[in-house]
Amino acid sequence: MIHVDGTLQSEHLRSALERFFGVAAGKITALNKRWNPAHGTPVFTVDGTYTSRGWTEWTQGFQFGNAIYQFDATGDRAFLELGRKATVDFMASHVSHIGVHDHGFNNVSTYGNLLRLMTEGCIEENSWEREFYRLALKLSGAVQAARWTSTADGLGYIHSFNGPHSLFADTMRSLRALALAHRFGHVLMGEQDRKISLLRRLLQHAEATARYNVYFGQGRDRYDVRGRVVHESIFNIQNGVYRCPSTQQGYAPFSTWTRGLAWVLSGFAEQLEYLETLPEEEIVGTELLDFPSKAAVMARFVETARATADFFIENTPTDGVPYWDTGAPGLTKMPGYLDRPADPFNEYEPVDSSAAAICAQGYLRLGRYLTDSGEPDVGTRYIQTGLTIARALLDEPYLSTDAEHEGLLLHSIYHQPNGWDNVPNGRSIACGESCMWGDYHLMELAVYLQRLASDGPYLTYFAVGT
């Protein structure tokens, strides 16, 4: 169980954040100088060197988004120009990519970050450049929403790269693409010029995720534990009926792949911030089943986020860094593993620091929302949990300080069941490596915390003007 430090404040992390951005500068520069985009996109490291893995093209936006965030944190325009040029040169194919569920990862991390910085006044105003970013985000949100499977209960979901039968937990974090496109007044145009609301699809997908990928301890099956998350839900595409839980990257359909939970926690928390900005009539106008008011929708998002947040606290080691799956079989050989900090060098099961980085931001956003909504006790607990996790990740053994290692966040896992992650010589499990989404989410977390510590503007995409 996480030992939440109730005394920790964002200001206490200032020196750790300064150190982090100092380390990040050299690594971002070196990777972008070495990397040949013709070889694909960097996904994870092997012996400290980034390599590609052709499964889906979902990490290039993280690579360039890191440079944009480094400018955000330091004001060094070399990183802004790196990110801005790379976005123009390489990201267009991601805007029109019809085969993935990852638009919020790739495109919001690049076009979205650049637009956010312009709106904040951090980069010079240029109306044509602004419209370029807005158009990219409009199209990205619509293309993502078009990847749609309707369900028998009146909902539906953006199906994963596995096909129309597959609802992934991951996509909850990617809904930010639909949110921004809707914010800019865009719709998805269908047959006979039917206008399809991106907000409606966002809400339908979110409720499908809550209903089928998240458990609430209500006896749904024999393994219904509140806050447990299943990576994948399977549907019969002939009639839209739900069939069963499944997983691609977790240990089993009835265990919790911790990064899947992280996507859900962070995704619901961030979407609460988005929905908060919408008027009642806009949400009610979507005519979403079972939710007659904005308050009812918000309550459902809170219920889901809190369930996953509580489960993670209870099923994660004391420092807030989880093992890759709560049901990983080797954990039975590690008595008391939840009563001490995670051990990335153990002999049985890998940790996944990337899940921790994603969760930390989710806790901070959820805690802030609840505190502002009149629940300061639980809100503060979640904020302190996020800070506790961040402190662990900004220090050894998770922060990568070796200039020869291209990653920023060590001890992440991509696909344990497939055996893709590097096992160093002399070790029995994968450790010591980084991944692009882990680096990016630690970077995003660091910028978020830097702004809190300096009383700067709150880090959100949803203040972006129309």
Image (cartoon, rainbow, N blue to C red):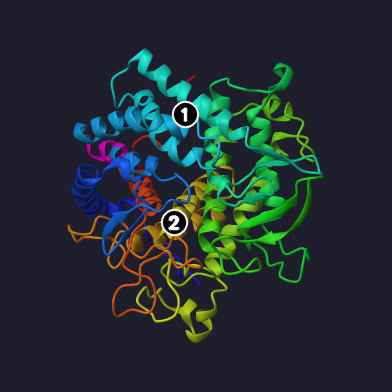
Secondary structure beneath dot 1 equals loop
What's the residue type where badge 2 is placed?
Answer: Gly
Q: Main secondary structure of the magenta part?
A: helix
Residue drawn at (41%, 65%) of the image: 5
Q: Which mark is residue 322?
A: none
Residue drawn at (39%, 40%) of the image: 61
Residue drawn at (37%, 48%) of the image: 440
Q: What is the x, y in percent for residue 353?
A: 40, 62
Q: Which residue is mark 2?
A: 386
> Going by the image, does 419 lie left or right of 283?
left
228 shown above or below 199: below
Q: Which residue is mark 1?
A: 463
Location of residue 85 (image quadrant): top left
Which stretch appears magenta? 68-74
Residue drawn at (45%, 65%) of the image: 4
State the separation of the CA atoms marked 2 and 1.
Answer: 23 Å
